Image (tube, rainbow, N blue to C red):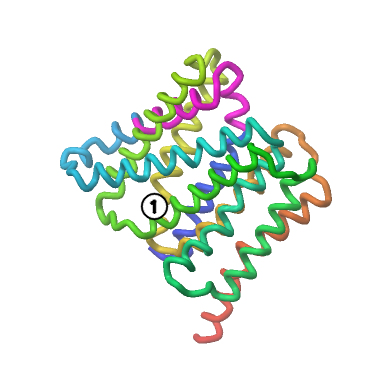
């Protein structure tokens, strides 16, 4: 698989994660956020188990441990995001969660003991500024909710880096299936401790939960590690910054939420950060032909 195809696949994953905000609004009319976490990852686990049952016939200790590792990290990603969103403003939560874009190159630099390239630094800072303009519309202050959001961003950046470091080879599908089951189970435990468990009531809520399970979880968290094998963690982090862009555009199309000039500027900056390095690379390749 070429890096261009891998990055396009990751862009489709990010699109569905951007759409998840709309779907979660519909799904959470009658249930708590941890209840929804348990359901969406549970649906994803069942779907992937049915589709790839033959891949689970030869499980071993190594595959199970890798799935447990990824599942625990993913749980803390969502624990931070959910807890933070409930305790701070939506704009602050969206911005702080997206700071994974800058945490990934920082972690990579620490692991490699080398500074990132100038282009990586420039693209990352451009994306961060764009995220600020797009998401922070209600003022910004650090509070307990902000710390939870930063925790979620830290664990997502860690997730990207660990996926890049852990060799999975042909076992990527069973590892990711176990990951989905672990995240669902931990979400269920948290739900039982902090919420009243419930199932979706109407067809719209069920539709939202199934879409979250199929596309945002099953597709998203299985395709990401496959695509990431053919690109870099820094590029995955930059593509992730498109999530609030897709969320804002879908809200404009389906919820009639009007975008301001400031938000449009943020979108332009993020597009520039994500597409700029790719266009420069293609230009260099063309020159060398």
Horizontal placement of 127 versus 155: left or right?
Answer: right
* Residue 42 against residue 165 in the figure, above or below: above
Is-magenta flag for residue 40?
A: yes
In which quarter of the view is residue 273 placed?
bottom right
In which quarter of the view is residue 268 placed?
bottom right
Residue under the point 77% across and 36% down? 257
Classified by dominant secondary structure, the portion drawn in magenta counts as helix
Residue under the point 41% across and 24% down? 189
Residue 238 x, y percent position in the rendering = 57, 59
Q: Nearer the viewer, residue 220 or 28?
A: 28
Q: Quadrant of the N terminus?
A: bottom left
Count the numbered circles shown.
1
* Residue 20 against residue 167 in the figure, above or below: above
Task: Please provide the residue range marked out in magenta.
Answer: 22-45
Judged from this view, the residue extending furthest toward the right is: 261
Dot 1: what SS?
Answer: helix
Horizontal placement of 41 versus 138: left or right?
Answer: left
Residue 157 x, y percent position in the rendering = 50, 53
Residue under the point 45% across and 32% down? 213
In which quarter of the view is residue 180 placed?
top left
Residue 46 x, y percent position in the rendering = 34, 29
Residue 29 x, y percent position in the rendering = 61, 19
Mark 1 Cα shell of 10 Å, populated few (<14), some (14-19), many (≥20) = many
Horizontal placement of 86 versus 72: left or right?
Answer: right
Residue under the point 34% across and 45% down? 69
Quickly name the residue at label 1. 225
Judged from this view, the residue extending furthest toward the bottom is: 288
């Amino acid at each position: 698989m070429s890096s261009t195809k891998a990055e396009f696949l990751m862009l489709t994953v990010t699109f569905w994660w951007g759409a998840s905000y709309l779907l979660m609004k519909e799904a959470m009319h009658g249930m708590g956020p941890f209840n929804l976490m348990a359901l969406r990852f549970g649906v994803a686990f069942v779907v992937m188990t049915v589709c790839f049952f033959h891949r689970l016939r030869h499980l071993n200790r190594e595959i199970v441990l890798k799935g447990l590792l990824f599942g625990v990290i993913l749980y803390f990603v969502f624990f931070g995001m959910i807890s933070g969103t409930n305790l701070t403003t939506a704009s602050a939560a969206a911005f702080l969660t997206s700071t994974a874009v800058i945490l990934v190159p920082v972690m990579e630099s620490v692991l490699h003991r080398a500074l990132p390239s100038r282009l990586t630094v420039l693209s990352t800072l451009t994306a961060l500024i764009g995220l600020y303009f797009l998401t922070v519309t209600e003022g910004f202050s650090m509070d307990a909710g902000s710390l939870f959001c930063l925790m979620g961003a830290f664990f997502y950046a860690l997730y990207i880096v660990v996926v890049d470091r852990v060799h999975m080879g042909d076992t990527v599908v069973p590892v990711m299936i176990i990951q989905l089951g672990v995240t669902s189970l931990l979400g269920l435990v948290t739900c039982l401790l902090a919420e009243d468990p419930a199932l979706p009531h109407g067809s719209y809520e069920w539709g939202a939960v199934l879409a979250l399970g199929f596309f945002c979880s099953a597709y998203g968290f299985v395709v990401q590690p496959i695509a990431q094998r053919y690109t870099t963690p820094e590029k995955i982090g930059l593509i992730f910054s498109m999530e609030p862009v897709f969320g804002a555009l879908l809200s404009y199309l389906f919820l009639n939420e009007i975008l301001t000039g400031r938000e449009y500027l943020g979108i332009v900056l993020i597009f520039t950060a994500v597409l700029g390095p790719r266009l420069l690379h293609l230009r260099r390749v063309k020159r060398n032909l």
